[in-house]
Image: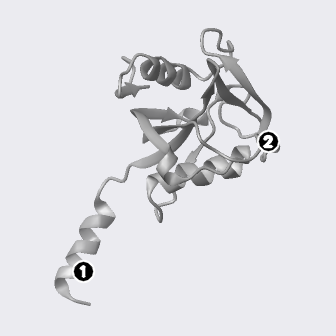
């Protein structure tokens, strides 16, 4: 192996890696589509937006389109999603663990198909809620993101103790 390539690989192996999450925002008639987490071990019983992780082998618009299809059964073209918010979040996990993540929120209005819960093993409810009457058990970071989006704020930070 070339010495420069070896140095590059060693340097990259030590570099901090930041995870990316993608979130799908569907608002219709003043209501937002939310799903309730179930049997995941993290935030079970809390409402969130359809979401997933970037797998590292796709453009972010394709990641959110993939998650929309996987979770809520809708077909959306990558050119029909618009990024509306970015959040740098400290993501708490069980047992006092946490990790940093960049959350990218994409809105969409054009789609084909029927909304359906494709993942009942990790989602026990999928429903539209009025933006002015969100469920009490909405995940705090999702509520924060929605407030930012509705107020035209394109970037926020959450979970760092002062958010």
Identify the residue at the far top of this view. 132
- Quadrant position of the N terminus in the picture: bottom left
**Marks 1 and 2 in Cβ contact (< 8 Å):** no
Tell me which residue sits at (68%, 25%) in the image: 46
Residue 20 image offset from top left, x and y in percent: 45, 47
Tell me which residue sits at (76%, 40%) in the image: 115
Instruction: Quote the CA–CA distance across marks 1 and 2.
Output: 48 Å
Identify the residue at the far bottom of this view. 1
Q: List the residue tagged with mark 1.
A: 6
Q: Is residue 121 found left or right of 66 in the rendered image?
A: right
Q: Is residue 100 visible?
A: no
Closest to the camera, between mark 1 and mark 2, is 2
Q: Is residue 21 visible?
A: yes
Sequence-first tag of 1 and 2: 1
Picture colour scheme: one colour
SS class, disc 2: loop
- Seen from the viewer's position, the closer of residues 76 and 90 is 76
Residue 140 image offset from top left, x and y in percent: 55, 20
Residue 71 image offset from top left, x and y in percent: 70, 46
Residue 112 image offset from top left, x and y in percent: 69, 47
Within 10 Å of the Cα at label 2, are there few (<14), some (14-19), or many (20+) other Cα atoms? some
Tell me which residue sits at (42%, 25%) in the image: 158
Q: Is residue 150 above or below residue 96?
A: above
- Quadrant position of the C terminus in the picture: top left
Instruction: Tell me the tag on residue 116.
Output: 2
Q: Quadrant of residue 162?
A: top left
């Amino acid at each position: 192996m070339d010495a420069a390539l070896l140095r590059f690989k060693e340097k990259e192996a030590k570099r901090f890696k930041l995870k990316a999450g993608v979130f799908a925002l569907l608002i219709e008639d003043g209501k937002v589509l939310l799903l309730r987490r179930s049997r995941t071990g993290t935030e079970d019983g809390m409402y969130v937006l359809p979401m997933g992780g970037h797998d590292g082998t796709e453009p972010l618009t394709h990641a959110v389109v993939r998650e929309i299809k996987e979770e809520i059964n809708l077909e959306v073209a990558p050119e029909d999603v618009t990024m509306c918010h970015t959040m740098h979040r400290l993501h708490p996990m069980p047992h006092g663990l946490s990790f940093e993540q960049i959350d990218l929120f994409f809105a969409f209005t054009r789609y084909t198909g029927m909304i359906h819960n494709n993942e009942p093993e990790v989602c026990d409810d999928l429903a539209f809620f009025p933006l002015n009457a969100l469920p009490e058990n909405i995940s705090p970071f999702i509520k924060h993101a929605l407030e930012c989006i509705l107020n035209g704020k394109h970037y926020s930070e959450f979970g760092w103790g002062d958010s």
